[in-house]
Every structure is written in structure tokens, then in C-alpha cells.
Image (cartoon, grey):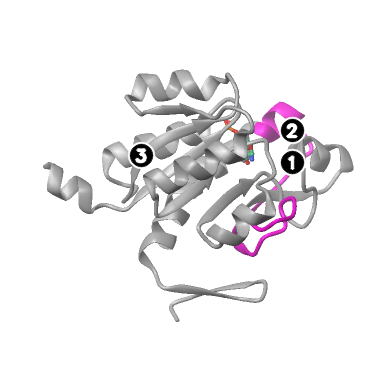
Amino acid sequence: MNNIEQSNKPSIVVLASGNGSNFQVLAEKSLSGELIANVRALIVDRACGAIERAKKLGIEVIILSKPWYEDFEKVINDLKPDLVVLAGFMRIIPEHIVAKYFPRIVNIHPSLLPAFPGKDAIKQAYDYGVKVTGITIHFVDAGVDTGPIIFQKAIEIEESWDLETLESKIHELEHENYWRVINNLLQKPHKIEGRKVKWGV
Ligand code: GRF
């Protein structure tokens, strides 16, 4: 692919604070052309596993310094991504930034929201004993995991599963679906009415 084609593609940035498996899938899907966007950069707020993954894939890493949200705003203003993709970014985006960029920041959460928001959602669901859990991809608003829901996928928890099994099933679901949802957001018309995300209108 030549540079002109490259530059015509939409671009995304991915924010992570941890392991970075979702980031890696997005980057690989971008490189294979299945994700229609360029992953312009990995943005992190701390030393974390995602950095090494980005280096191996040749993707620029931007480390936010304190206060992280000032840096974040500057980076977004400079790079002007079509979508800001949170993938295990362990910070709450301040209200003034959400107001400025809504609805261009999306997040993935490992439960069926509004059940089990916040940290350790897979363990929360597992310990609660729910029979069905899943993943949620949503627009980011000023709350914790409260924004309008774009996509959900459920999974039934089998009695024989331990927490580790459930974690790996949830991550598989995330890896299968996040890039597809991002493709949809970037190419299919949609609108947000109140809490509802509507497609094809
Ligand atoms: C994922 O489970 C995601 O839903 C949550 O944080 C986790 C990040 O995992 N927001 P990884 O760093 O992408 O492996």
C-alpha cells in the first residue's frame, strides 16, 4: 500500500495501562487490513506490558506524563485521530475532555454493563455467581463505564469453569469483536439518541 492510500485511511489511537492484548489485536488487524484504520499510536500512562507489544509491531508509543490528562489532550489535538480507543486504560477521563470529544472515545469493558462496572469486572461477575456475563463496548461519558452502549456479547458461564477459564473466554470475545465494532463505527452511519446508539440512520 502506498503512502497516499495509507493517509486516506481513518486513524485511531489506543490507550492502555496494562497487558495490552486488545491493543495488540487491533494493531495486528490494522496491519492485515481487516481493521480499516491505522493504529497511529499506543498511548500509556505508566510502564506496562502494552509498550513491548507496540515496539514489536513498530507502533509509536507515547507515555503520558503528569498531569496525564493535559498531555492526553495535547496528544489528541496533535494526532487528530478519528477515534480514541480505550483498551484497559485505568483512568477516568475528566468531564471537560469527554465533553470536547464525545462521541469519539470508546471503551471496552469485560462485563454486561450496567452489571459489574469498575475494576476486576470478570472476577466480580464470577464471584457473584451469575450464569451469564459478557463484554460491552460503549462510548465514554463522564461516568465510570456508564456511556451509551454500542455493542454487547454474552457468554454462559459453565459450572466447570474457574476464574482463569472465564477470563480467557472473555478476552477471546473482546479480541473477536472490538476491531469489528471499530470498523462499524468508522464506516456505518449511526447516531446517539439519549442512551441509545442507532445504526443506519
Ligand atoms: C480488558 O478486559 C478490557 O475489557 C478492560 O481491561 C482489559 C484489558 O486487557 N477494560 P488487555 O490489557 O487488553 O489485555
Instruction: Give the residue type at disc 3.
Output: Arg
Q: Position of residue 196 (x, y in %)?
A: 63, 73
Q: Is residue 95 left or right of residue 34?
A: right
Is residue 139 something one can see in this rendering?
no
Q: Is residue 143 left or right of residue 82?
A: right
Q: Which residue is mark 3?
A: 40
Residue 40 occupies which quadrant of the picture? Answer: top left
| Element marked by disc 1 | loop
Q: Residue at x 77, y 57 (%)?
A: 114
Q: Position of residue 102 (x, y in %)?
A: 56, 61
Q: Is residue 38 left or right of residue 15?
A: left
Cα separation, mark 3 vs mark 2, equals: 38 Å
Residue 120 occupies which quadrant of the picture? Answer: top right
Q: Of the two numbered discs 3 and 2 on the same chain, state the one appearing first in sequence.
A: 3
Is residue 182 something one can see in this rendering?
yes
Q: Contact, CB < 8 Å: mark 1 with mark 3? A: no
Q: Quadrant of the N terminus?
A: top left
**Which labelled disc corresponds to residue 158?**
1
Foreground disc of the pair 3, 2: 3
Q: Which residues are magenta?
A: 140-167
Q: Of the two numbered discs 1 and 3 on the same chain, state the one appearing first in sequence.
A: 3
Q: Residue at x 45, y 81 (%)?
A: 201
**Which labelled disc corresponds to residue 161?**
2
Q: Contact, CB < 8 Å: mark 3 with mark 2? A: no
